[in-house]
Amino acid sequence: MKKVLKKLCELQAVDSDIAAFRIKLIEIPKKEQTSDENVKRAEEIVQDIDAELRKKEIFRETTERETREARMSLSKHNTQLLMAKTNREYSALLKEIEEEQKSIEKAEEETITNIMEMEELSKKLEKRKKELEEIKRKEKAERENLSKMRKQLEMEIEQKSAERQQIATHISASYLTTYERIRKGRGNAVVTVKDGMCTGCNTLLPPQFITLVRNGRKIYTCEQCGRILVWHEDVE
């Protein structure tokens, strides 16, 4: 019976390895998604700056066109001013000229401010583009590592599954059924008895019961947690 208990411990060790590998395997898609999101965020930053820069360029072009039109109108009105025949006409033209001059001055100030902002945005865009390329390079390497990790984990699971199958051939169907039932509900199905207690739930066990477990003539389970008990020296 001790051989069966030892095989159950071996089976549990393999199952623990498989479970750990599967947890890591499950985490890979999450890490891949995080990697994709890192690149996407960096791309969106570049796109936003580029869009803002294009708006500034459109604004500059519009302002320059309006300024040219205002200058042409100003020149026309200056010419008309020299030819004005009445005070009323003269005053109206002066008012229009004054408004156009203010409009031109304001447009020139806006153009200067706009050019400065575009220069800053251009620098910012170049910086973010370089950062984007670095992030792409880094995340590409990360995806390659994750791909290798996935293949390695799948191989490990396959090997451990074959090992598990081999171990299971030395255990009767009834014991396997008991093992699987306990494992499904408790995680670890087999635990050791050490220092007078069940290491699965830390319950103190009666001395006589401990002796029975130590003798290992049959399978005993903890009355508290239901796990299969094994004398610690038999598996350490």
Image (spheres, helix red, strand yellow):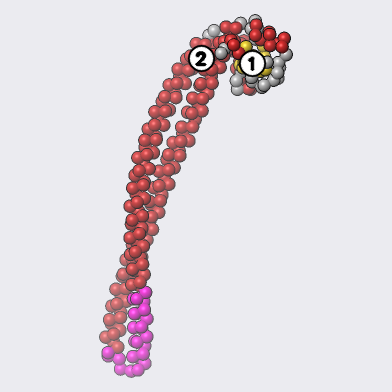
Q: Where's residue 191, x and y in %?
A: 62, 17
Residue 187: name its quadrant.
top right
Instruction: Reply above or below: 55 against 64.
Output: above
Please tell me whether residue 162 is drawn above or below residue 107 in the rendered image. above
Query: Could you tell which of marks 1 and 2 lies nearer the N-terminus?
Result: 2
Q: What is the magenta segment's predominant secondary structure?
A: helix
Q: Residue at x 40, y 54 (%)?
A: 48
Q: State the residue position of label 1.
A: 194
**Residue 52 falls left or right of residue 232:** left
Residue at the disc numbered 2 = 164
Disc 2 crowd rating (10 Å Cα; few below 14, some 14-19, many 20+) is: some
Instruction: Residue 199: give x, y in percent of width and height.
Output: 64, 19
The segment highlighted magenta reads: 82-106
* Residue found 62% across the figure and 11% down from its top: 231
Callouts 1 and 2 close, C-beta under 8 Å: no
Q: Nearer the viewer, residue 104 or 221?
A: 221
Q: At x 52% / y 17%, what residue is drawn?
A: 14
Q: What secondary structure is marked by label 1?
A: strand
Q: Is residue 103 magenta?
A: yes
Residue type pointed to by label 1: Lys
> Does 207 appear above or below 123?
above
